[in-house]
Amino acid sequence: MTLIYILSPLVALILYGFVYVFYHVLIAPRFNILRNLPGPPVPKWFGNHLQHVLNPIVTPRVHEIFVQRYGRTVRIRGLGPWDERLITLDPVSFTHIVKNTAIYEKPWQSRRLITSLIGCGMLSAEGQVHKRQRRVALPAFSAQNMRSLVDISFKKGIQLRDAWVDLLHSETESTSARIDVCQFLSRVTFDVIGLAGFEYSFNSIQDETNELFVAYKDMFEVAISQGTMFRTLLSIYLPTINQLFPDKTVRTVQRCQEIAEGEKSGDPYDAKDLLTLLLKSNSAADLPPEHRISDDDILNNINTFMFAGSDTSSLSMTWTLFLLAQNPDIQERLRTELLSVAHEFPRDLSELSEDQVQSLHTALSALPFLHNVTRESLRLIPPLHSTLRVATQDDEVPTLYPVHNRDGTVNEKKHSFIVPKGTVVHLSVEAFNLDKAVWGEDAWEFNPDRWDNLPEAAQQVPVAFFKHIELFGGTSCKETEDKITKHNVVLTRPYLSGRFKEGTQCPLLVSRFAPP
């Protein structure tokens, strides 16, 4: 009798699990309203389309085929037959989903993975938690604070140039050297964000031994590698495994977090300057108590700013140099334009007055081709390829283009569709950037001149290619242009002092350039 009492709950649990899996794998998908939408076939029962929509090497062609065959609202398969997903290539739908953050959140799996690396900052927080963190963080990155970025960025650009010149001088038998530009630009963005955002100097261009810099660098490498896929998935669904059986990845993250939080070996890490602006904002007298965030949240957002900000910025600058190396004629045009205003740069660059900073900012902002090169680079290779959202409730999504039906017919009057609760939506920034219907037949080519005469379709479509800059909330045109200017300021001195040729991807072949 005792055995029956023990086995009955176990049998009931197994039976419940079987029914749950049977329903969600075989029954529920048949009644999913997304099945009314068209989508590519799946060759195998457990097959999926993830390798086609997440691989940047093939996605431009995949998106083009999707639009030609299925329209701009396409059903795809995720992890299995129970996982019907949606990919939208419609600009109105894209904007609706991005703006309605209360309905569309990042998947909990992504948020848990990000949180395990850098804590629950604005990159992984949702709802009211995200709003509180954003409200506290914004004053630290006010327009007044960001103006100092011009001075800092220009000086770091000079340090970058000097570091590359030293490498060129070390090549005694050659006038050029193969340089891993991405590694150097990563150090630059670390330094810029640390100084401008947190008044902390990593000085990583000259010195890579800074303990905090090394900690963040190690966390980046962990984020990229993420160990084995099986272990990663297991840690997402069973997070306690990281506490019970920590692997090399977990131990690395823990060590980095201890350094960042000032707890290594029980000795406090002197990071007070790093926290000043956020702490001041969080303790402002006009901030209601319910809007304040905890000290842990502040530390998590420091990790977030360093992780997301430096990574996307260094990548965007790296791709800009790579595209210029592929297009030497464009590189020479850009250098010629910069030389036309080089005489306006202050002679003594070690200390810049407020007037000199403003003069430098104005001079660079007035260079149309420099601006076009940066915008075209961000359009062609956005640092954020795509992102995911999950519907927290049923929602009717508007469209610009008519929605296709599963049988291939098109209802010209139908300009909306229903997204069921729990649906994963793929939002591809790249798809909008490379849409030939918007940008023309040369949409896949690097052509900065297109910005002097944009097609009408490109002017009407939301500026999707800038969403990677601020995908967690709105950004004004002025803020967007300001970020582009900072990008330009860092690279101005390298543009003027070196020529870039293709190497083995990145490293690039860099040679010294002496202005006439």
Image: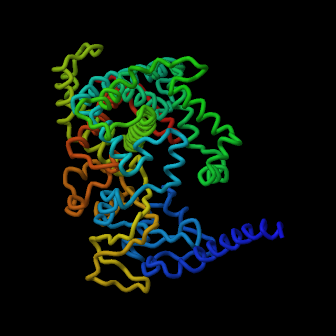
Q: Position of residue 490 (x, y in %)?
A: 33, 30
Visible residue check, residue 171:
no
Visible residue check, residue 151:
yes
Q: Position of residue 410 (x, y in %)?
A: 34, 83
Quadrant where the C terminus is found in the figure = top left
395 sits left or right of 351 in the view: right
Q: Which of 112 and 153 is in front in this view?
A: 112
Q: Where is residue 277 in the image (x, y as percent from the top left)?
A: 32, 27
Quadrant where the N terminus is found in the figure = bottom right
Q: Looking at the rendering, which quadrant does residue 68 occupy? A: bottom left
* Number of dots carrying numbers: 0
Residue at 34% in and 30% down: 278
Q: How is the image coloured?
A: rainbow
Q: In this view, does 149 lie above or below 478?
A: above
Residue at 72% in and 68% down: 9
Q: Nearer the viewer, residue 412 or 230?
A: 230
Residue at 31% in and 42% down: 374
Q: Looking at the rendering, which quadrant does residue 279 occupy? A: top left
Q: Is residue 336 above or below residue 123?
A: above
Q: Nearer the viewer, residue 430 or 160?
A: 430
Q: Which of 204 and 212 is in front in this view?
A: 212
In this view, the residue farthest toward the front is 1
